[in-house]
Structures are given as structure tokens and as C-alpha cells.
Amino acid sequence: MSTRRGDKGRRTRPQRHKNTFAFKNDLHDKHTPLIKLINTLHVSEVCERCKEVIEWKIKYRKYKPLTQPKSCTKCNERKVKRAYHVLCRDCALDSKCCAKCLKPAGEVTIVPPEPTDEEKQKLKVEMDQLIKSQPERKRRTFLRYMNKGKKKQNVDSDDEDGERREKKAPETTPRTREELMEKFEQLKLTGTNGEDVDNLSDDEDYENFSDELSN
């Protein structure tokens, strides 16, 4: 019997055979350095659609990392270090387009790049200078906000095939400079007589960063 859309005898029952558990790309080699590296990749400098494609490849073990940098299609230098990208990081940021499909930022939403170690250090120094003038409680609140990062949305529900997704620990991404500055302005406008912004009484997370306040 045909199941083509529009046929009178279209099947309405769900599929007969379903997976009992979700696919895990590190089921048999969790401690392999390559698998660890692939699973911790931060997909950026691409549009949302291309990000979904690359993340699907990572999830189902179809991702093939580059063994050596390849040439950028714009500057022709061997600076492309991410698989499936055709532009290097610098050219993608300068041209404001997707590093994979080359669609401009006006048509698609580009995922912001992960900051480099130098950028992280520079941002940390800048934020340290800002919070020195704030009271102790606001310093702690700001440091918790900065170091916890931003949680990603993880779905734990039935997918289209009725397969139950596995619960995972929430992943986090670093806060951007704009988000940190917005939080800092909120703290500046917050009074000190009992007003609370982000659970100021909880100092447990602050203990790991007490050395940053020693100055």
C-alpha cells in the first residue's frame, strides 16, 4: 500500500521499529583524544543552518577534522583550521558572512566566534579594572556571572521518531563583552540596601575566584 501524501490509504500508525536509546558517538572510545577534541568543538563563524549541519555530523560521528590547515578562498593563505569552512577566521569576520556557505550576515544570523586566549586575557583585565570600584557584594555577583558563562538550551523530550533523548549536563559558553557590560551597568544601578540582582547571598561559587579580588 502506498504511503504517499494524498493517498486515501495513507498509513497512520507510528513506525514499527524504534531505537530504545539515543546514539552516542563516544560509546566505545570515550577516552580517545580525537573524540574528546571533536565533542568539545565550539562551532562558530557560521550561520545557524550550517551550525546545525556541523553539529549533526559531530553528534553522529560523521565529522572529519582537518589534518592540516587548508587554503582560504578569499586570502588564499593556509589559515582555515576548521573542517567544512572555506574562509579563515579573519576573513569571515572582516567580510561578515558565513565561513561555510558564504551567505552575508544580512540574510542569516552568524554565530559569534569563540574568543582567543589573548582576547580572553584582555577582557579579564578590563573587567578587573571595572569591578575594583564596586562594593564587595557586587564584585562577587559580577564574578559569578562572568565565570559561570551562559548555559546552552538542552532539549530532553521525544524527537520526531519517538526516541527519548538522553539527559546531558548543561553546556556553557563564555559571556560576550556586551553581556558583561550590560550586567555591570545593572549592578551600578542596583542599590545596596537589600536589593538583590543575582543571589548575592550565595558565596559558594565565589571561593574559587577569591584570588582575583586580592588586588
Image (cartoon, rainbow, N blue to C red):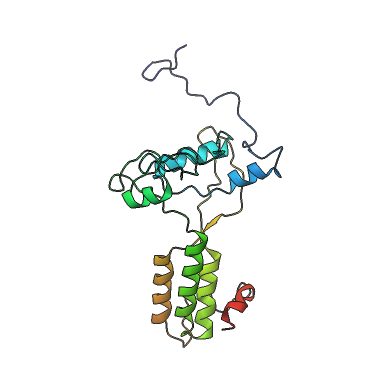
Residue 93 % position (x, y): 37, 52
Q: Nearer the viewer, residue 161 or 64?
A: 64
Look at the picture and state if 168 lies above or below 66: below
Residue 187 % position (x, y): 43, 78
Look at the picture and state if 152 lies above or below 64: below
- The residue lying at 62 percent from left, 31 percent from top is 19
64 left or right of 110? right
- The residue lying at 44 percent from left, 69 percent from top is 180
- The residue lying at 49 percent from left, 77 percent from top is 128
Residue 151 % position (x, y): 52, 58
Residue 198 shows up from this direction: no
Q: Nearer the viewer, residue 76 or 206?
A: 76
- The residue lying at 59 percent from left, 43 percent from top is 38
201 left or right of 29? left
Residue 122 shows up from this direction: yes
Look at the picture and state if 99 lies above or below 131: above
Q: Nearer the viewer, residue 193 or 112?
A: 112
Give the quadrant of residue 166: top right
